[in-house]
Structures are given as structure tokens and as C-alpha cells.
Image (tube, rainbow, N blue to C red):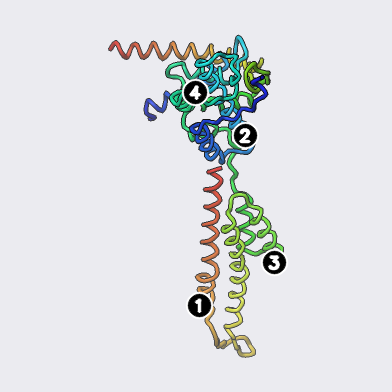
């Protein structure tokens, strides 16, 4: 049986992908901005740098696309946007995640009462 | 003066040191993946320095966008701490590695080299495969190639053993008397000195290839 911390780290790693997609659902974002937002959310990531490989994987999987845009300050910036494929994956995850979360919460609450 | 024309070279020694450590850690990644990761982190750091700088100075300042040095050391350290350990970043890139090579080339090379069959062609083919191996070091390739006499030398010794029986028989094929090395001794010697060492070396090299394949 895996220790709690390991289980949580696996869960976090898996869910993180979808948090990225969720952040991109309404607007495209500059990598730095995306990473900063995720990094400043408590309990989600340990090192912001680890998000870049994740972004690269999402891109390879066709769930996000990137565009270079000129910036007012400094060199051009790489912007990330969600693709149709990414939206499908996000919708699927969101529905399943809610069921999963509710199920776990219910059972954990029962455990706490007894 | 436009700031965007200035090349973004991060000049802070802590940042440079961080990037060096990241470059070193990222050597295990395939080239394209490594370049992409380093670009992203470099641009992240430049943006982070700009961010910290922008809070100190007016955004229209000529230095804006240059990853300027007049940010406090605390800002730089916070930026780097938030990014995390270079080794962690590289290992996060891990699962995307190409599937590990299983070492099929190495196994075939060893079989050809150790048996040496078919004669000449077997050895040559094995040597070519060994040299082209991407899992063995140069030293291991040399070792793989010198293993080859094992195969034919065993055959040779076996044959010598046959000859050395030096059997002389009566014309009707009975009453044989042997001189020279007994057959069983020749076979034992062949096994101990000629067959076993190449097999040990081959096992060692096979394991080395598997270890390397797991690392990649």
C-alpha cells in the first residue's frame, strides 16, 4: 500500500494537466503567467519549473497549441491556447472528477464521524 | 530607445548559475526536448526579472524587458526558489522520454560474436552491430568484439581434442589404443577456458546494455 503522500502526489500530477486546461478555457495565456497562477495556488505544485515539461506534453498530445506574440516589453512570448481536443478532455475529466471527489468526500466524512 | 531591441541576456550571477545547473541536469533529455525546456525556463526567468523590475521602476523605463540587474537578490532568489530544483524540472520531463531501447541489437551482436557463426560473416556482422550499439560504451564495444574467438576457438579445441585422441585401431576397428590428450580432458579444457569466459563477458555486456536501456 502506497503512503498517503505518494498517493496525493500522483493525484496532483494527474489533475494538474486539467487545471492547466481549465485555466486556458476562457483565454490564451503566456507561459509565465500560466505557470505563476498555478504556482501561487496553494498545494498544487511544488516547483513552477515542473509545469513547463507538462505544457510540452499537453502540446504534443494536441490538447494545447502555442503561438508566438510580440510583447510590449522584451522578446516575443509564447502563448498557450486550448484546442478542441483539449476541451473535450477537460469536459470529460471535470464530470468524472466531480463524481470521484464527491464519492471520496462522502466516505471520508463517514470515516470522520465514526 | 526601445527596450525590445535589447537581447534578453540574464545577467544575474544566481540566474546564470541556475541555468548552468539546469543545462547539466537536462543532458539526459533528447535534444529537441532539452532545447524547448531551456528556452521556456530562460524566458520565464527573463519575464520574472522584468516583473520584479517593473515593481521597482516605471514600466516605460529604458531597461524594462532586459532582465535588468537592478532587482534585489531576494527577488531573484524567490524567483528561482519558486521554479524549483533543476533536477526536479528535468525529472518532470521524464515520462515523455522515448520508450527504452530493449537492446535487441546488442543481443544479436553477442550471439553472432560468441558463436562466430556462420564463419567470418557471423563475426563481421556481430562486430558491425556491436560498433553501432547505442547502449554500449567504447570500452564495452571493444570487449564485445574480443569475445569472438570464444566461438571458433571452442570448436578448434574440440577438434584438436578429437585429433589428439590419436587413436590407433586394429584394422577391424576393435582394440583401439589412444595416445595424446584424452577426449574428456580436451572437452573440459575447452569449456573452462574457451567457452565460459566469453559467456561471462557476454552476460556482463548484456546486463550493461539493459542497465543503459533503463537509464535512457
Assign the N terminus of chain A to one quadrant of the image.
Answer: top left
Label 3 and label 1: CA atoms lie apart by 26 Å
- Disc 3 chain ID: B
> N-terminal of the two: label 2 or label 3?
2
Residue at image location 55% in from the left, 13% down from the top:
B58
- Kindly identify which chain the residue marked by label 4 belongs to: B
Query: In this view, which residue lies farthest toward the front?
Result: B1
Dots 2 and 4 on the same chain? yes
Using the rendered view, name the quadrant where residue B167 is placed.
bottom right
Measured in 3D between alpha carbons, the distance from the residue under mark 1 to the one under mark 2, in whole angstroms, is 62 Å
Chain letter of the residue beneath label 1 in the structure image: B
Q: Nearer the viewer, mark 1 or mark 2?
A: 2
Q: Earlier in the sequence, mark 2 or mark 4?
A: 2
Dot placed on the residue nearer the N-terminal end, 1 or 4: 4
> What is the spatial separation of the Cα atoms under label 2 and label 3, in whole angstroms?
46 Å
Return the residue at label 4: B71
- Where does label 3 land, which residue? B119
Q: Nearer the viewer, mark 2 or mark 3?
A: 2
Residue behind mark 1: B185
Depicted A91 relative to depicted A45: above or below = above
Q: State the CA–CA distance, disc 2 to disc 4.
A: 27 Å
Q: Nearer the viewer, mark 4 or mark 3?
A: 4
Q: Which mark is residue B35?
A: 2
- Residue A3 is left or right of residue B20, and the answer is left
Assess whether mark 4 and mark 2 are in contact (beta carbons under 8 angstroms).
Answer: no
Q: 10 Å neighbourhood of mark 3: few (<14), some, or many (≥20)? A: few
Q: Nearer the viewer, mark 3 or mark 1?
A: 3
| Residue closer to the observer: B4 or B94 | B4
User: In this rendering, which labeled residue sits more in front, label 2 or label 4?
Assistant: 4
Q: Toward which corner of the image does residue B2 lie, by quadrant?
A: top right
Marks 4 and 3 on same chain: yes
Amino acid at each position: 500500500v502506497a503512503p498517503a503522500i505518494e498517493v496525493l502526489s500522483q493525484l496532483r500530477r494527474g489533475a494538474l494537466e486539467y487545471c492547466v486546461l481549465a485555466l486556458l478555457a476562457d483565454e490564451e495565456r503566456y507561459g509565465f503567467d500560466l505557470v505563476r497562477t498555478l504556482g501561487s495556488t496553494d498545494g498544487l505544485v511544488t516547483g513552477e519549473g515542473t509545469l513547463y515539461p507538462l505544457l510540452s506534453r499537453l502540446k504534443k498530445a494536441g490538447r494545447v497549441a502555442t503561438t508566438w506574440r510580440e510583447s510590449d516589453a522584451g522578446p516575443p512570448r509564447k502563448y498557450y491556447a486550448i484546442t478542441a481536443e483539449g476541451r473535450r478532455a477537460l469536459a470529460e475529466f471535470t464530470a468524472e472528477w466531480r463524481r470521484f471527489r464527491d464519492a471520496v468526500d462522502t466516505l471520508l466524512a463517514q470515516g470522520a464521524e465514526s | 530607445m526601445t527596450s525590445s531591441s535589447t537581447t534578453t541576456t540574464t545577467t544575474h550571477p544566481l540566474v546564470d548559475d541556475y541555468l548552468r545547473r539546469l543545462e547539466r541536469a537536462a543532458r539526459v533529455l533528447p535534444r529537441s526536448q532539452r532545447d524547448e525546456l531551456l528556452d521556456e525556463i530562460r524566458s520565464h526567468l527573463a519575464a520574472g526579472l522584468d516583473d520584479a523590475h517593473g515593481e521597482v521602476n516605471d514600466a516605460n523605463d529604458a531597461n524594462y524587458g532586459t532582465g535588468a540587474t537592478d532587482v534585489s537578490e531576494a527577488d531573484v532568489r524567490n524567483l528561482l526558489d519558486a521554479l524549483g530544483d533543476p533536477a526536479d524540472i528535468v525529472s518532470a520531463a521524464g515520462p515523455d522520454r522515448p520508450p527504452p531501447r530493449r537492446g535487441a541489437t546488442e543481443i544479436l551482436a553477442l550471439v553472432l560474436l560468441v558463436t562466430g557463426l556462420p564463419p567470418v560473416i557471423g563475426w563481421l556482422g556481430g562486430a558491425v552491430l556491436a560498433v553501432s550499439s547505442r547502449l554500449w560504451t567504447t570500452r564495452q564495444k571493444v570487449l564485445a568484439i574480443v569475445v569472438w574467438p570464444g566461438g571458433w576457438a571452442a570448436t578448434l579445441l574440440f577438434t584438436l581434442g578429437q585429433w589428439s585422441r590419436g587413436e590407433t585401431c586394429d584394422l577391424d576397428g576393435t582394440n583401439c589404443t589412444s595416445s595424446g590428450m584424452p577426449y574428456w580432458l580436451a572437452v573440459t579444457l575447452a569449456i573452462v577456458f574457451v567457452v565460459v569466459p566469453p559467456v561471462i563477458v557476454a552476460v556482463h555486456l548484456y546486463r550493461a546494455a539493459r542497465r543503459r536501456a533503463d537509464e535512457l
